[in-house]
Amino acid sequence: MKCKFCDKQAVIKLRAYNLKLCHEHFVEFIEKRVEKTIKKYKLFKKNDRILVGVSGGKDSLNTVYILNKLGYKTEGLYIDLGIGTYSEHSKEKAINFSEKFGMSIHIYEVKKDFGMGITEIARLLRRKPCSVCGVIKRYILNKFAHENGFTVLATGHNLDDETATLFSNVLSWQEGYLARQDILLPQKQEKLVKKVKPLALISERESAAYAILNGIDYIHEECPNAQGATSIFYKSILNQIETKQPSTKLRFYLDFIRRGKKFFESSLQEREEQLKPCEVCGYPTTRKVCQYCSIKNEVQKRRG
Ligand code: SF4
Ligand SMILES: [Zn+2]
Ligand SMILES: [Zn+2]
């Protein structure tokens, strides 16, 4: 199997693009594609300060690595969720990455705010860990970015994450979520930092191959709370379709962004109009007290 662009042996076959590429041309292909995404969707510029939410997984570490390589001012924020050995291992990967490549990664501990990790908070409040975790992660990332002068908040969502979410939101016609699903969420409020997904057009397989070929060591184990998640099931269904019809995922996602999303814009506007400062912390929310402060209050009350 020869590379499409040189005489070297191809290391990967990309059926979605009908391409076989060697190590060097595959790395170049991914970086060019990310750069094109940044420019086409106007995600950020060279003078922006970008904070990447780092989990220790391949996608977020790749995001820090690629953006730095492309010359963007990028730092990472690892949130220690306090989920047993999973958090210990993923933190180790983030620290090792930062030391190996000399890229800055800040660490924030959920335990410092709550006195306990996500698993204990969820147990105490009798809520699902992922719903508590989602609220806490989103809040900390935005607040850290805002308070530390970052102009953009990037996450490592890849094409498989994005299409699984889209698929799920379409199945239940979640208008509000559909309105907000995009590669870029612009800054509409002073305290809500612009959010972007530079790897949204890179598949999970491409991302894993890129990390391995660049010596980026990442956490392979899944969070224990992800077991049985519907997103994993939807990803496997979409992969079955992709095997039969290569590039379906890319078309599904891009056609939604280009043609489908506009039908849900009114729900986006409605939500924006409802945003007002949280009575406790002052960050925008559609409630009186934001979800983060409510969780914090509830934890304090129940601990006595
Ligand atoms: S699987 Fe759930 S609990 Fe685990 S990191 Fe993801 S959102 Fe948080
Ligand atoms: Zn080549
Ligand atoms: Zn609040």
Image (spheres, grey):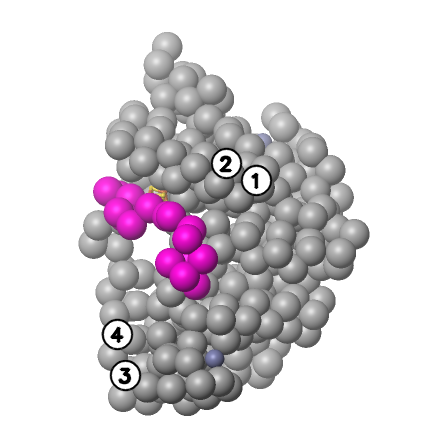
Where residue 205 appears, as percent x and y from the top left, is 35, 68
Inspect this view and state whether residue 142 appears.
Answer: no
Residue closer to the observer: 92 or 122: 92
Per the image, label 3 sits on a secondary structure element best described as helix
Kind of residue indicated by mark 3: Thr
Where residue 190 appears, as percent x and y from the top left, is 75, 44
Kind of residue indicated by mark 2: Glu
Residue in the image at 53% along x and 44% along y: 101
Extent of the magenta region: 210-225
Give the CA separation, mark 1 to mark 2.
5 Å
Does the magenta run of residues contain 223? yes
Marks 1/2 in contact by CB < 8 Å: the verdict is yes
Q: Quadrant of the C terminus?
A: top left
Marks 3/2 in contact by CB < 8 Å: the verdict is no
Residue closer to the observer: 38 or 161: 38
Between disc 3 and disc 2, whose residue precedes?
Answer: 2
Where residue 75 appears, as percent x and y from the top left, is 61, 42
- In the picture shown, does residue 178 fall above or below 99? below
Give the CA separation, mark 3 to mark 2.
38 Å
Per the image, label 2 sits on a secondary structure element best described as helix
